Image: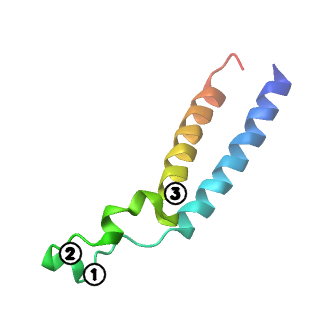
Amino acid sequence: MGILRIILTIIFVLVSLALTGIVLAQEGKSAGLGAIAGSNSFWEQNKSRSKEGKLVLITKILAAAFIVLALLLNMSFI
């Protein structure tokens, strides 16, 4: 079981570093003046298809992997 813990720890560190990099690569969520007027721009409607939308999806996946790995590494039988 010791080798499994080492492998999971290495994966955990890599996921942590990737998650940090992805979060830092994202833009801020400041709405700007477009939110005051309440306009629905083309950008807001197609946000999930953009680079920013993909970064958000990758962030969610990496965060889920981070939580699962943290729970697995905290279990005493591994």
Q: What residue is disc 2 on?
A: 35
Which amino acid, by three-letter code, is at mark 2?
A: Ala
* Amino acid on which the number 3 mark rests in the picture: Lys
Residue shown at 67% from the left, 56% from the top: 17
The label shown at residue 54 is 3
**Nearer the observer, 8 or 41:** 41
> What is the CA distance from the residue labelled 1 to the residue labelled 3?
21 Å
**Secondary structure found at label 1:** loop
Residue at the limit of the structure toward the right, as seen here? 3
> x and y percent of residue 51 in the render?
52, 65
**Rounded to the nearest whole Å, what is the CA distance between mark 2 and mark 3?**
22 Å
| Residue 52: x %, y % from top left | 48, 65
> Which numbered disc covers residue 32?
1
Colour convention of the picture: rainbow
Name the side, left or right, on which 10 lies relative to 68. Answer: right
From the viewer's perspective, tell me whether residue 4 is left or right of residue 66.
Answer: right
